[in-house]
Amino acid sequence: MNKRQSRFYISKRTDLPWYAAWGIRGAAILLALIACAVVTMLMTGENPISIYVTIYEGAFGTARRTWITAQDLAILLGISLAVTPAFKMRFWNIGAEGQVLIGGLATTACMICLADKLSNSMVILCMIVASIAAGALWGFLPAFFKAKWNTNETLFTLMMNYIATQLAAYYIIVWEVPKGAGKIGIINQSTEIGWLPQIGNQYLLTIIVVAVLTGAMYIYLSKSKHGYEIAVVGESQRTASYAGIKVERVIIRTMVLSGAICGLMGLLLVGGINHTLTTTVVDSRGFTAVMVSWLAKFNPIAMIFTSLLLVVLSRGASEISSNFGLNHSFSDILTGIILFFIIGCEFFITYKINLRKSAEKEA
Amino acid sequence: MFDLVSFIPRAVMQGIPLLYGSTGEILTEKSGNLNLGIPGVMYVGGICGVIGSFFYEQSTPAAEMNAFLAIGIPMVCSLLGSLLMGLLYCLLTVTLRANQNVTGLALTTFGVGVGNFFGGSLIKLTGSEVPSIALSATSGYFSKSLPFADDLGWFGKVFLSYGFLAYLAVIIAIISSYVLKRTRTGLQLRAVGESPATADAAGINVSRYKYVATCVGSMIAGLGGLYYVMDYASGVWSNNAFGDRGWLAIALVIFTIWRPSVSILASILFGGFYILYLYIPSGLDLSVKELYKMIPYVVTLVVLIVVSMRKKREDQPPASLGLPYFREDR
């Protein structure tokens, strides 16, 4: 390529011990946190230590804040778990946003339309079934076309997000209370029909569901036959079909599962937490989940930490922006910086940079 | 009666940011990079222009403003901002071989964050005493239409009533189309996107093509953000007003099956879809309007499916789209 030989060449690492890999990631996160502190310092003129104290305060300052942080963590982790099996199969589902929203929409539909027809427990049962089915459908469509005609799934799922958003926007106006308000408001506020039961406090149900889900997903991916098939299809579709795995079926099955879990998260968001539906209820977490899952190398346990990092940072950053009267998008900037560092550091885990000279000696 | 003479200019004004975005993304994707950061890049392009002209307007009273500087400063700032975003994307995906989807999404998070943050905090940060960011003087220069447009009736309104950035978008799209189809550079660029290993073997510098295509693509896309703020929104920045146009631009890339020249008309069509709900009599039922807004996405989806079913070779996405290239992997 070049006439001059470059002084460095790059080779793939084969045997990097896990502690070295996590050491590199840790160093990257540390660097990222320093970069974040510098950026915050430039914006606010505050010293870095007090910035991190503020971030900590914002995320864990009071018992209520800690619970909300835990709940946010649970939702983000849940959506990340949902997209993971598909990613492991190298199916780039960036449609979690829409799959969660459509699950939330189905939940809302049950809460509003069945409230005076069925008993509370039956409504909740319908909500569970409907939200999971809706999410599964939103996952099934791109998978079906991918399996049959190899339609690009990244772009397909991206479009499905906006179709879900507009559907939700449509029904929000159909169901708006009061007419002309442009929003639904709290659903069944007086009767609380369709509100998911509270365990202990209002936050715990979501956390428990996602904790169970994390364990289940870990076992599903690493110990079950399905998980193995997903891994093989992800490595090489040809190998998979030679080994007698029905690739089309695995793709569709996995995406239906992925969508179904997203739908379930929609149920939790609408039925358990917000008791209302807006088009922004998912709040870009469908996209953040992609990064959470990828950063954790698709390992459900590691995902707890990556989502914790992002949630704490974003809640801390909103605390900083409130304190200084700045815009709340500040957290997006910090999230972006952290992500760039972690994304970049993967290179140093996968590849090794060698000096040309030493290579010649070896040869 | 459907008022075409007022509909078309509005559709065009909606379409121009999409045209910039899609032309930029087509160039990028032709090099095999699926840059999902385009929405972020467009935000950054817009806000950098705003920052540039904000400082210029603050330092110079409107009467003394120089047309050349009033246009030049935001343009240069916008181009620089989006260039930096493009460079960041390339550094991560080409040099460091990171996953393109993840990098792109991170870039979008970051870019939208930068846009909204500075848009919402610029006044606070600079300690100035204006109530909101309204760059009407600068916007006046950007949206100045051709002097004789008003005299030509409907013809002037439909074809000549736009600011110079609108025409620039069309020119850039035509040039990109020409470069991709008819020049050696374009051929080599497409080769890089189809099969980087083959291109590499033929002596093409794969990394350089990817870098240049992605950075130029980002700069073009960034101008879309600039056009939106300065011309369409009359210099008023409001957070999230740009909305999902960046994603729509990516949709447009598929819709036009990777052809910038088709994109000129298609972007106007999409712009039309975007505002169609304003023109369709839906009575008092506002909800139906939300369904009309779905049309561009549904149409794109149908095109995506049909293209993949027909399996015509020239209609397919670049074969190595979204895949990193590592020479030693072969």
Image (cartoon, coloured by chain):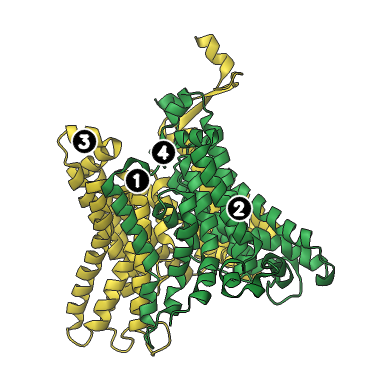
Chain colours: A yellow, B green
Q: What is the quadrant of the C terminus of chain B in the image?
A: top left
Residue most extreme to the right:
B64
| Label 1 – label 4 distance at C-alpha | 22 Å
Instruction: Tell me the CA gap for discs 4 and 2.
Output: 30 Å
Residue type (three-letter) at the residue carrying disc 2: Cys
On the question of residue A44 being in view, the answer is no
Which mark, by number, is residue B323?
4
Tell whether A49 sits left or right of A221. right
Q: Chain of mark 3?
A: A
Dividing the picture into quadrants, the one containing residue A103 is bottom left
User: Residue A299 shows which numbered tag?
Assistant: 1
Residue A125 horizontal side relative to residue B74, left or right:
left
Tell me where residue A98 appears, x and y as whole percent.
35, 63
Residue A120 location in percent, x, y?
Answer: 21, 82
Identity of the residue drawn at 57% across and 47% down: B175
Label 4 chain ID: B
Type of the residue with mark 3: Ala
Q: Which mark is residue A240?
A: 3
Quick one: SS at disc 1? loop
- Above or below, comparing residue A167 to residue A236 in the picture: below
Q: CA distance from mark 4 to mark 3?
A: 20 Å
Extreme residue toward the front, this view: B152
Q: Earlier in the sequence, mark 2 or mark 3?
A: 2
Residue under label 2, please give it: A36
Secondary structure at badge 3 equals helix
Q: Residue at x 40, y 50 (%)?
A: B257
x and y percent of residue A123 in the render? 20, 78
